[in-house]
Amino acid sequence: YQVVIATNPIYTPEAIQQRLRWAGLVDLFDHYAFVTHAENTHFSKPNPAYFAEILGRIGIEPDEAVLVGDSIRNDMVPANTIGIHTYYVGHKPFEPPSQGRKGTLQSFYDAITGEKWLDTLTPYAHAPQMIAPQLVGNLGALFGMLEHIQPHFWHQHPIPGEWSILQVVCHLAESERTVQRPRLATIRDEDNPFLSPPREPLDADHFYCDDKGYNYANNFAQERQQTLDLLEKLSATDWQRPARHSIFGPTTLLEMAYFTARHDRLHLNQLCQTLGQCK
């Protein structure tokens, strides 16, 4: 299993290392899939986007994670909001959501080793409250990955034929503007529309981006804000508006909005592998 130290990122890396030592844990950050601290995370608990950013940084989906925490407000509620399974080890009265559990750290260990509890978990049904935090957290993950990239790395390809870092970021901005948001607007405005698949992305040799990487990243953030503005105005009925997708068949605006978040993570994982930050 990948292990993340998801502690509220209000302390410096050095302070987090000291706290790890106090807990009797390895204090080397490379020992873990990710350790949040004040210099590498854009959100804090109880914002659900904090957990969404972590998922984007390590390249997994919400239903592939289990949060073990001792705070209902800071851990259980925001993690469940975006579809993460939870295990509560605190001392307050708390009724876990469906599939969630509570107990001691020892009982958690017994559940995953003896009962194989993790093998029984299934994804939570999509819900409107999942979407915005994931879309925002994915942005944080993107900018976190790009923060220390050297200029000459933007155009390097992990292997021949694979997109460069610049091309991935360029695609995210273009897709948000020409595919993701227009598709949601179409479902909102038309009765059961037919959604054609987007054109096939160009291969690495023919995909030309004529700008600097951070400009594309900032452009993506601006496009994403427009998408968030669109979603904020939706009613409960709007989220369930139907559509017909050429590949997925019958779908809804909610499902397509969740697919936008998954599209982000697909390419975040691509970046994560390219940068060697995924374990």
Image (spheres, rainbow, N blue to C red):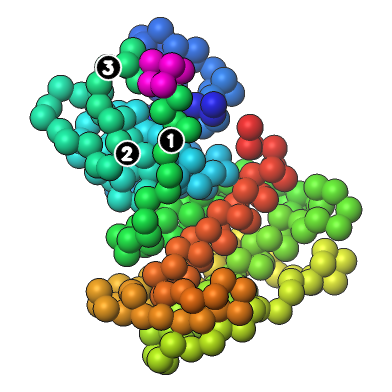
- Residue 94 seen by the camera: yes
Q: Which residue is drawn at 57% across and 61% down?
A: 263
Q: Is residue 139 above or below residue 93?
A: below
- Secondary structure under tag 1 reads helix
Q: Which residue is drawn at 28% across and 30% down?
A: 101
Residue marked by disc 2: 99
Sooner in the amino-acid sequence: mark 2 or mark 3: 2
CB under 8 Å between callouts 2 and 3? no
Where does the image place residue 43, in percent across and percent down from the top left? 36, 46
Farthest left residue? Answer: 93
Nearest to the eye among marks 1 and 3: give it.
1
Question: Any magenta on residue 111?
Answer: yes
Q: Which residue is drawn at 36% across and 9% down?
A: 22
Residue marked by disc 3: 104
CB under 8 Å between callouts 2 and 1? yes
Where does the image place residue 90, in percent across and percent down from the top left? 20, 24
Amino acid at pointer 3: Thr
Residue marked by disc 1: 120
